[in-house]
Every structure is written in C-alpha cells, then in structure tokens.
Amino acid sequence: MARHRPHGLSVVISLALLTPILSACAPENPPEPSIPSVSTPHTPDKGPTDDETPNPNGVSDTLDSAGAEAASAVAEKAMTAFVDRARPYDLWWPDVSQYLGPEARYAYEYTDPAKVPASAVTGAAVVSATPSATQVTVLIPTDIGQYNITLNRQNRDGEWTITRLTPPEGRP
C-alpha cells in the first residue's frame, strides 16, 4: 500500500531542494550603478549677521529705515482719519479705507465713526515690532491711550496697508 503525503509537505520539500540550485544561478552581489563623482570646491556658509535674516532668495528680510518711516507715516495718517469721529460716515469711510488692506476694510466697513473711542492722535508713531521687511507694528498715542497698528505689504518695495487697528487694552 502506497503512503500518501500531504500536498503542502511536497511543496516544502521541493522548495528545499530547489533553493540551492536556483541560488547558484544568480550572481552573489549584483553590480551597483556607478555614479561619476563630481568635485565641487567647498565654500563655508555665510551665516546671518545680527541685522539680517536668512532668505532663500539671498535678499535680506529685515525692515530698513525707509520702510519703517513709510509704515509709520501710513499708520499716522490712518489713525488721524480714524479718530476724526465728528465726520459723517460717507466722508469718514473713504478717508479711513484708503489705508486698509482687504481684510481690514471688511472688518471696519460698518464702523460708526461716532463710536470710535479715541478722538485725537496725541503724538508721533513709534515702530514697536518688525518681524520682517513686509510686516510691522506701529504704536500711535491717542487721547485714550496707545493704539497698536499692524501693517503689511506684498513685497519689500510695496505699499503699506493696515491689517488691524487695536485700541488700548481695556477699550472697545
């Protein structure tokens, strides 16, 4: 009587016998593609100095004095128009909105000038923060305290527009 082997065991035995034969036909280590070496001279990286920030375009991303002066001038003109609350809306809004960016125009569009808490600018603008050449924060003193004005521009030579007029803390 013939013995019957399970099918799975036959496959295992066949593979065990064939593996050494098949591996003898294949190369031990396939050749690796050769890549020509290119020698480039080493130049040390120039790190940023105290007054500049690295920029992928090689252009400094810091605000220069001309940019700071331009931002301060826009902030002062805008605040002077903004606190002129005795004017009717149809005269007040065109003066204010010309200094505002799109988001700020949307946010302040329906502001009632009579409800603006400040009524006068009482001093010169002071730049308080310059995160980059395209963003600046300017402080404007008013009769109720210091407003914080945030301005942006599209590029380092663009026109400044106001994104936010923040009244002194504790004021509406």
Image (cartoon, rainbow, N blue to C red):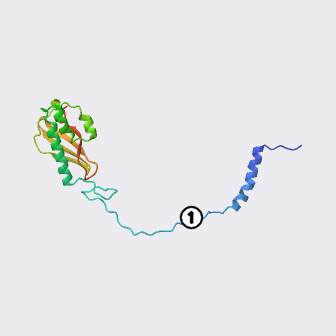
Where is residue 23 drawn, in percent x and y?
69, 59
Where is residue 161 drawn, in percent x and y?
23, 44
Q: Mark 1 belongs to which amino acid?
A: Pro
Mark 1, Cα crowd under 10 Å, few <14 / some 14-19 / many 20+, is few
20 w.r.t. 169: above or below? below
Pick the residue in front: 39 or 61.
61
Where is residue 132 drawn, in percent x and y?
26, 50
**Farthest front residue?**
90
172 w.r.t. 55: above or below? above
- Counting labels gives 1
Identify the residue at horizontal 80%, vertical 44% (top origin). 5
Pick the residue in front: 111 or 138.
111
Where is residue 50 drawn, in percent x and y?
25, 57
Could you tell whether 126 is left or right of 56 in the image? left
Q: Quadrant of the C terminus?
A: top left
Identify the residue at horizontal 51%, vertical 68% (top origin). 36
Residue at label 1?
A: 33
Q: Looking at the rendering, which quadrant does residue 54 occupy?
A: bottom left
Q: Looking at the rendering, which quadrant does residue 20 occupy?
A: bottom right
Identify the residue at horizontal 26%, vertical 49% (top origin). 134
**Farthest right residue?**
1
Q: Quadrant of the N terminus?
A: top right
111 w.r.t. 60: above or below? above
Identify the residue at horizontal 18%, vertical 44% (top origin). 75
User: What secondary structure is found at the residue carrying circle 1?
Assistant: loop
